[in-house]
Image (tube, rainbow, N blue to C red):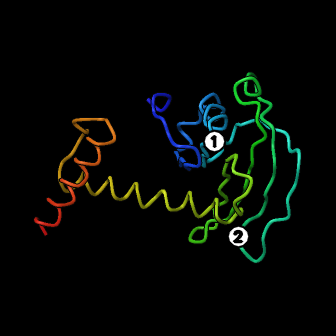
């Protein structure tokens, strides 16, 4: 489904690492669409540049990488960015993947963190209004259904 979506150049797409698709990342890169995701633990890559992580923020590494796994370079031949950050609440290390080389490493980590608020919003919609799927999938249909759900949630409270 993600291959069918069109985004304007400059858009930042934040997705779950379960959706890692190197061909899709390459397509977005070609069209000027940025992505931020978590890098899978088994991803193979080589570091081509080490950047100095910002201090005192919770960034451990900021690296430019090239994918080296079987077929990965052919699917996504672009130079990507790998960022290691420490999660404030648990101390876990999270590894992010993007091709946005201009934003600060802590900004990339914050963009991914903000994704969780969207997850919580949709969880609330599903739980409070018993929405299992969207009736329509066009941008207009989804927006209409979300606005309708928000109004219903406000009326029910």
Quarter of the image for the C terminus: give it.
bottom left
Separation of disc 1 and disc 2 at Cα? 28 Å
Is 139 located above or below residue 52 in the figure? above
Left or right of 14 on screen, residue 65 = right
Q: Residue at x 17, y 62 (%)?
A: 153
Provide the secondary structure element on which disc 2 rests: loop
Frontmost residue, 97 versus 101: 101
Is 154 located above or below residue 37 in the figure? below
Pinpoint residue 118: horizontal percent, then vertical percent.
40, 56
Q: Compare marks 1 and 2 and give the one earlier in the sequence.
A: 1
Pinpoint residue 151: horizontal percent, then vertical percent.
17, 61
Pinpoint residue 152: horizontal percent, then vertical percent.
14, 59
Please name which of the two marks, 1 or 2, marks the residue nearer to the observer: 1
Most extreme residue toward the front, as rendered? 9
Left or right of 48 on screen, residue 61 = left
Is 21 located above or below residue 111 in the figure? above
Pinpoint residue 60: horizontal percent, then vertical percent.
77, 63
Quadrant of the image occupied by residue 125: bottom left
| Residue on which disc 1 sits | 32
| Residue on which disc 2 sits | 58
Quarter of the image for the N terminus: give it.
top left
Quadrant of the image occupied by residue 71: top right
Quadrant of the image occupied by residue 76: top right
Within 10 Å of disc 2 (Cα), the crowding (few <14, some 14-19, many 20+) is: some
């Amino acid at each position: 489904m993600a291959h069918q979506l069109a985004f304007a150049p400059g858009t930042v797409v934040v997705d779950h690492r379960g959706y890692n698709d190197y061909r899709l990342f390459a397509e977005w890169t070609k069209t000027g669409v940025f992505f931020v995701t978590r890098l899978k633990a088994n991803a193979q890559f080589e570091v081509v540049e080490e950047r100095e992580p910002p201090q005192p923020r919770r960034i451990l590494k900021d690296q430019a990488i090239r994918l080296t796994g079987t077929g990965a370079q052919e699917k996504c031949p672009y130079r990507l960015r790998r960022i290691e950050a420490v999660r404030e609440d648990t101390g876990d290390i999270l590894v992010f993947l993007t091709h946005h080389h201009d934003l600060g490493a802590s900004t990339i980590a914050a963009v991914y963190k903000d994704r969780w608020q969207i997850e919580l919003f949709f969880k609330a919609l599903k739980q409070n209004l018993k929405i299992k799927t969207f009736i329509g999938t066009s941008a207009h249909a989804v927006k209409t259904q979300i606005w309708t759900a928000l109004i219903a949630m406000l009326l029910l409270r």
